[in-house]
Image: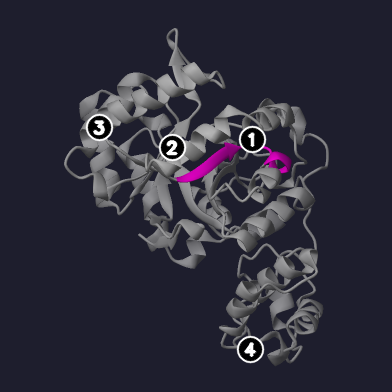
Amino acid sequence: MNYRTLGKTGIKVSEIGLGSEGFVGCDKNATNRLIEAALESGINYFDLYNPEPYVRSNLGEAMRGRRDKFVIQGHICSAWLDGQYKRTRDMEQVRAACDDLFERLETDYIDVGMIHYVDEQSDYDKVFGGEVIEFMKKLKADGKILHIGMSTHNPKVAIQAVKTGLIEVLMLSVNPAYDMLPPNEDVNVLFEEETFASDVLSNIDPEREELYRLCEFTGTAITVMKPYAGGALLNEKTSPFGVKLTVPQCLHYCLTRPAAVSVLAGAKTVDELKEAAAYSGLPESEKEYASVLAGAPAHSFSDKCMYCGHCAPCTKGIDIASVNKFADLCEVQETVPETVREHYEALSAKASDCIACGKCEKNCPFGVKIIEHMKKAVGIFGK
C-alpha cells in the first residue's frame, strides 16, 4: 500500500481507503472480516457518513484497543432519525448525532470531521453563515475533531468552501464521467442516463479543473467518492463512454487528479476490498486508462493532458505529465506559486530539455501537442 500526505493536515493515509456503505447489512462478524482485511491490506483511512447505528457500533468495537491504526473521516450533520438516514442542519439533531457518533465509535476524537453533503448554494450559505460552521470550529478547538472537512458533489460550492480557508479536506465525487459535467445542485442527475446522452463528455469541466488547481495550491486534500460512478463505468452497457473501465483504471484516474490523496472505495465483500487494495502493487500497464478513454466511441478528447503518463518514456527523461500538471496549475492563476515552483525545480529534467523529437506525441492517445506544451512550460518556469 502506498501512503500519501492528507494535504496540510500532515496525516499519512493509504491511497486506497474504505467507505462505510459496505458495512450496511453486515453483522459484527462480517464487519470484523472487512476491517481485518482492510488493515492487512494496509488501509488506514475510513469514511463514516453515519448510516444505521449498528454500523457505527460495529466499527467502534472493531477499533477497540487499536484506535491509532484508524484515520477516521466522520460526518457531522448526518443523523439517523425515525429509522432512516437524514442530512440535517437542525442544531439539536446535529449535536445529538455527533454525540452518538463519538459514543458508538468509542473514541474521544475524530481525525477529520466532515460537514456532510453540501451541494446547494442556499445550503452552503446556511452552513457557512450560521451555527453549523461555528459548531465545527468549536469541535476543533476542543480537540474533538482534529481537522475540518466537507463532502459535496458540486464543484461550484466546493470552490467557495475551499476559499474560506476553513476546509482542510474535501470529499468529492470523482471519475472521468463526472469530471466532464458542469456543476449541478441536484446530485441525482449524476445517476440519470439522459445526463450523459448529449455530447458533453469532450473535456474536463472548467470549474472542476479550477477546483483541482485551487486544492493543489491551498494544500486542501481531496478524498474521493463515487470512483466507479455507481458501478456504471465498470460495464460497457452502462458506461457513458460506451467502453468498460476496470477497477484499477478507475482508481488510477482518480489518484492522478491534482490534490487527490485517497479513494474511499466501496466494498461489500472481502474480495471486492482486496481488488481495490491491490491497486498499489499493480504494474502501470494494468492501471492505465488513457487508451480506453481515448478510444471511447461515444465521446472524444483532444489536446488535453490527462496526466496519465502514456507519453513516456521521454527521450530526455522529462516527466511530461508532471510538467504539464505544474504548468496547468500556474496558467489559470496567472502566477507561479512557490510550492509549485519548488516541485518543478525538483524534476531531474525540465521542459527546456525537450528536443522536439515528437516520440511522446506519437504515444499520446489524446492528441496533446506536447512539444507546444513544453514550450509553454518554459515560458512559465523560465527553463
Highlighted magenta segment, given as a residue range: 147-157
C-alpha gap between disc 1 and disc 4: 50 Å
Check if residue 344 falls in the magenta segment: no
C-alpha gap between disc 3 and disc 2: 17 Å
Q: Which residue is mark 1?
A: 128
Q: Which residue is mark 2?
A: 139
Report the amino acid beneath label 4. Answer: Thr
Residues marked 3 and 1 touching at CB (< 8 Å): no
Q: Earlier in the sequence, mark 3 or mark 1?
A: 3
The quadrant of the picture occupied by the N terminus is: bottom left
**Residue at the limit of the structure toward the top, as seen here:** 82
The residue lying at 78 percent from left, 68 percent from top is 331
Count residues near mark 1 (Cα–Cα under 10 Å), then give few for <14, some for 14-19, many for 20+: some
Q: Which residue is mark 3?
A: 106
The residue lying at 73 percent from left, 42 percent from top is 156
Report the amino acid beneath label 1. Answer: Phe
Q: Earlier in the sequence, mark 1 or mark 2?
A: 1
Observer-side mark, 1 or 4, equals 1
C-alpha gap between disc 1 and disc 2: 15 Å
Observer-side mark, 4 or 3, equals 3
Residues marked 1 and 4 touching at CB (< 8 Å): no
C-alpha gap between disc 2 and disc 4: 53 Å
Q: Is residue 195 above or below residue 281?
A: above
C-alpha gap between disc 4 and disc 3: 55 Å
Q: Decide if residue 268 is on the left or right side of residue 210.
A: left
The location of residue 286, given as percent across then percent down, is: 49, 60
Q: Which residue is mark 4?
A: 315
Count residues near mark 4 (Cα–Cα under 10 Å), then give few for <14, some for 14-19, many for 20+: some
Residues marked 2 and 4 touching at CB (< 8 Å): no
The residue lying at 44 percent from left, 66 percent from top is 283
